[in-house]
Image (cartoon, rainbow, N blue to C red):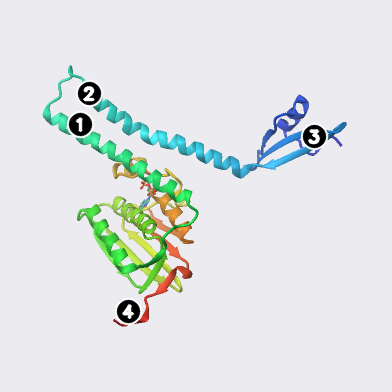
Amino acid sequence: QPVTNFVRHPDFVAYLERGDYRDPVTLRSSRSDAVLQVRLIEFGEERKLLNSRDITAQERLETMRRDLVANVSHELKTPVTVLSGFVETLADKTIEVSAAQRQRFLGLMAEQARRMQQLVEDLLTLSALESSPAPQDEAPIEMLPFVEQLAEEARALSASRHRVVVRVDGDCRLTGNAKELHSAFSNLVSNAVRYTPEGGAVTLFWKLEGARGVFGVEDTGIGVEPRHIPRLTERFYRVDQGRSRDTGGTGLGLAIVKHVLTRHQASLEVESELGRGSVFRAVFPAQRITPLDPARAVA
Ligand code: ADP
């Protein structure tokens, strides 16, 4: 039977008819996201070998890379445009700028510069996480002081607009890279503060659930509709662009959280109700939890 009876993809049929088989042909399924790279190799007399490679995963990575470049450029575009606009205005001797205006412009310029700085920092964090397979310098971390420190940072960020509460129940240590875990947890904490209106509460907790350890942040903030939850850890995914940017968000925070947790064999659980608040929980496996040594516990 002719091979086109088995493989009916129009691009494949066209490839065969063209008769030039030096390059492979890429076939995309109309029913799934599968992508095959097919090549016909002629050999011997009248013999042909059909070689087919599944390049679905490769294509997906390539799409992700393209999206990342497009997103980063897009994110940088606004602050750069705003900054250069103000620089031009201030440099132009023919435009009269009052001292008060000048001060205001400089404030806005500083804000845009901070935004770019934060974006670059988050991108560097992500790239560092991606370029090393496992966290270095793992050590047991005492959770009470660790969580207390995060709470102090939350209070500084909140500037008394929220009530910040700490609840540490499990007397134990968590083994991991302190710097990475601090970065992940503080992203959760800063989100809770940023997405909770004034007067709300932010609770940081650490507890044991069976043999597993759970760090969590609960807030009484704006919440997230369930349909968004599965996508929150995607780079640059934001439910509300304006709100994220206005509060200094880069859209990369939860992507960093996801990365750090995966490297620690932990998972992120999100529960949220629109208008009522959210709970973000990082659940660590038993092998990362060690009880405080008995001597210390007694002391
Ligand atoms: P961002 O820098 O935009 O905060 P993140 O990756 O940290 O980026 O979070 C992604 C999106 O998830 C946010 O833009 C926001 O819409 C939503 N989100 C994260 N944390 C919370 C929270 N505690 N309450 C409500 N929405 C949240």
Query: Disc 4 residue type?
Result: Arg
Spatial distance from mark 3 to mark 2, Cα to Cα?
A: 66 Å
Q: Which residue is mark 1?
A: 105
Sequence order check: which comes first, mark 1 or mark 4?
Answer: 1
Residue in the picture at 28% in, 30% down: 83
Q: Nearer the viewer, mark 1 or mark 3?
A: 1
Residue 56 in the image: state x and y as whole percent.
Answer: 62, 43
Front residue (pair 243, 215)? 215
Camera-side mark, 4 or 3: 4
**Is the Cβ of the residue at disc 1 closer than 8 Å to that at disc 4?**
no
The part of the image, by quadrant, that contains residue 93 is top left
In front here: 211 or 226? 211
Q: Quadrant of the N terminus?
A: top right
* Mark 4 element type: helix
Label 4 with label 3: CB-CB less than 8 Å: no
Q: CA distance from mark 1 to mark 3?
A: 67 Å
Residue 4: numbered disc: 3
Callout 2 secondary element: helix
